[in-house]
Image: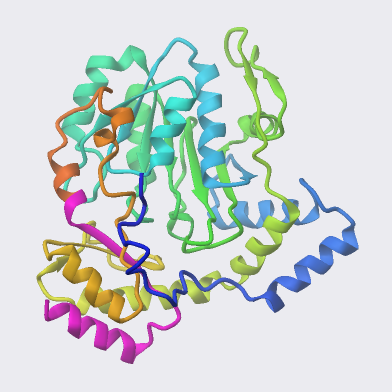
Amino acid sequence: MKYLFVSKKKMPKNINFQSLARSKKILPYLKKIDANKHYSNFGPLHNKTTRIIENLVKFPGYSCTLTSSGDASLNAVFKLIKYKNPKKKIVICPSFAFFSDANNIFNNGFKPYFVDINKHDLTYDMNLLEKVLAKKKNQIAAILYVSPFGYPISIQRLNYIYKKYKISVIYDAADTFLNLKNEIPLKEIFITCSFHPTKTLPGNESGLVLSPKKYKDYFYTIINHETLDLKKIKGKNTICGFNGKASEYDCAILLANLKRSKKEQKKVNDKNLFFKDNLNKNFFFQPDYGKWASNKLVFFTKINRTKLERLLNSFQVRLYKIWGDKCLHEYKMYKNHYKTKMTNSINLKKMNYSFFIDDRFNKNFSEKLCKKLNSL
C-alpha cells in the first residue's frame, strides 16, 4: 500500500515538507520539562496543552484527550464503540479515505461498509448513505465521516445523522484542527485529529480525541494500558487498553507550533488561494472551499501524471497521490466487504493529486510553477 507513487530514482532531493517551529522556539518548553522534572506522561505541559486546545475549539460539554497519534485516537474511539455495541458488527466508512480508517475498523472487530461519496464536497452520497442506514440500521455500530484533506465537515450535518438514526458518529478530522468550526456537537459525536509533522498544525506524531466529558475517564484508561470495566455503560464488557499516551515532549513541540499557528495559517491560506485563482481549467478543486488552512495544494486533473511528475520534479517539488493510488475497497484486504456502487470514489481517485506548499513558495517561485503547470 504505497502512499507515494514517485519512484526513489526520480524523487526530488531537497524537500521541506512542512515548516515546524525551530529548536529555539521549542527550547523554552524543554527547559520547563527539566524544571518540572516530569518527563513522561500527564504532566504540566500535557495539562496546559489540553486546556489551550479546549479553549480553542470551544465545544461546550466536550473534553480533549491527547494521544500519541491520530491513528491511536481512532483506535481508542473504536475500542469504546466496540464495547458500547458488542453485538453490532458494521461501521460505515468512505472508500475515499486513508488506510488508518479501515484498518482501525477491522482491527477492533468490525466490518467496514464502504459508501460512495458525492462530487460536491467529497463526503457521503446522502441517498446511498440513507439506503444503507435503512437496510442495516440494527447492525451498524457507528458512522465514520472522514475530512477530505482537512476541509471541515459541518457539525450540523453530523448532528442531523446522529439525531435521526441514534447511531454514534466518528469524525476523522485528521488534518482539520485549524479548520474546526465552533458549533455545538450532540452527545455521541467523537472527533479525532492528528498532529503528524506533515499536517497543517504539526507536532511530533501526536493526536487528540474530542468527546463528551462523560467519556474522558474512559479514554484516559484506554490509552494508558489499563483494562476498563464498562458495566456503567452497557453489559459486562471490558476494554483492553494500549499505549496511546502523548508525552511531555510531544506537548512541547505542539505548544511551540500552536503559538505560531495563526501566522502560519494565513501564509498557507494565501499560497493555496494563489494557485486556485491562477491555475487554468485543466485543474479543478473539490470541494470548492475557498479560504481554509492547508499546507498542501490538493487538486484534480486529467493531465498525464508522468508529465505532471516530471515538471514538478524540475522544481524539486514532490507529487503525491493522497491516501494511496486506489480506493480502500480496491485493496485485496477489503475487496469482499460490503460496499455501494463506487463510481465517484474511483473516478475522483484517478484524478486526485497533491503537493506540499513549503517555505520556498514565495511569489516568484509560485508564479513560475503556476505558469509551467498551465502549459501542460
Is 371 colored magenta in this rendering? yes
In the image: residue 181, left or right of residue 95: right
Direction front: furthest residue: 9
Magenta region: which residues?
349-376
Q: Quadrant of residue 161?
A: top left
Q: Nearer the viewer, residue 333 or 156?
A: 333
Q: Quadrant of residue 329?
A: top left
Q: Quadrant of the N terminus?
A: top left
Residue at 65% from the left image edge and 22% from the top image edge: 240
Is residue 200 visible in the rendered image? The answer is: yes
Residue at 52% from the left image edge and 72% from the top image edge: 262
Residue 141's spot in the image, x, y percent? Answer: 41, 20
Direction bottom: furthest residue: 364
Residue at 22% from the left image edge and 15% from the top image edge: 135
Residue 327's spot in the image, x, y percent? Answer: 26, 41
Is 131 colored magenta in this rendering? no
Q: Nearer the viewer, residue 250 or 176?
A: 250
> Up-down: is 325 above or below 329?
below
- Please say which color scheme the image uses: rainbow
Numbered marks: total: 0
Q: Nearer the viewer, residue 13 or 176?
A: 13
In the image: residue 94, left or right of residue 54: left
Residue at 32% from the left image edge and 92% from the top image edge: 364
Residue 84's spot in the image, x, y percent? Answer: 53, 18
Q: Quadrant of the C terminus?
A: bottom left
